[in-house]
């Protein structure tokens, strides 16, 4: 059996490095792109005559949102609330899509993702996603809005 000379080993290591570095760079770009694409604007749909409060989810919460959306079950039930006062949470991303949707509404236990002329509905059991989204904006919403929300969520927020 022939021995591999040190020169041969160096050549193989160099070849592996030459191939591996671009692959790691590409992988990093893919992960970065998915993270950036997931940055989400949240709007509390509560006011009629003035701008609604809004905030941006940080990267960790944006990734958590994507995981929570993946766990929702599809449904054919109802439409989001159109009441006066609190109507739910609207999600958007000026840089791209959120889980394949242009924008998403969470309201009254229903999550509706919109893309073009079509929509897809999901069940938000116990309004867990909607509650969590509101909680991510506690510092933006302020005490007056936060005090009004328990009645909107049936007394438990």
Image (spheres, helix red, strand yellow):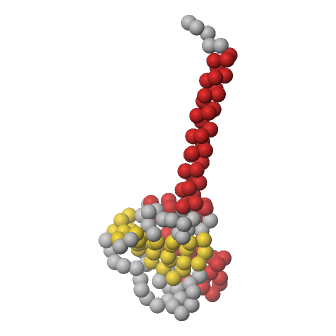
Q: Position of residue 86 (x, y in %)?
A: 50, 85
Work out whether 62 lies above or below 45: above
Quadrant where the image shows the C terminus:
bottom right
Q: Taking the image as drawn, is residue 68 in sight? A: no
Q: Please name the residue shown 66% across and 22% down the image.
A: 10
Q: Please name the residue shown 57% across and 65% down the image.
A: 39
- In terms of image quadrants, where is residue 24? top right
- Looking at the image, which residue sits at the far bottom? 49
- In terms of image quadrants, where is residue 56? bottom right
Indicate left or right for 156 with 80 as reference.
Answer: right
Q: Position of residue 49 (x, y in %)?
A: 54, 93
Q: Taking the image as drawn, is residue 15 in sight? A: yes
- Looking at the image, which residue sits at the far top? 1
Quadrant where the image shows the N terminus:
top right
Q: Please name the residue shown 65% across and 13% down the image.
A: 5
- Judging depth in this view, the residue of 153 and 86 nearest the camera is 86
Q: Please name the residue shown 53% across and 69% down the image.
A: 93
Work out whether 1 lies above or below 84: above
- Judging depth in this view, the residue of 95 and 49 nearest the camera is 95
């Amino acid at each position: 059996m022939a021995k591999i000379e040190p020169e041969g080993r160096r050549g193989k290591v160099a070849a592996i490095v030459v191939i591996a570095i671009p692959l790691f760079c590409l992988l990093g770009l893919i992960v970065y792109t998915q993270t950036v694409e997931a940055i989400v604007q949240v709007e509390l749909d509560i006011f009629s005559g003035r701008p609604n409060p809004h905030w941006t989810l940080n990267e960790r919460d944006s990734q958590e949102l994507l995981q929570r959306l993946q766990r929702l079950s599809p449904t054919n039930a109802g439409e989001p609330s159109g009441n006066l006062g609190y109507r739910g949470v609207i999600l958007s991303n000026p840089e791209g899509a959120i889980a394949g949707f242009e924008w998403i509404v969470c309201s009254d236990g229903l999550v509706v993702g919109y893309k073009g002329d079509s929509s897809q509905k999901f069940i938000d059991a116990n309004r867990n996603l909607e509650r969590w989204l509101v909680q991510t904006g506690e510092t933006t919403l302020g005490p007056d809005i936060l005090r009004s929300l328990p009645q909107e969520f049936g007394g438990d927020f």
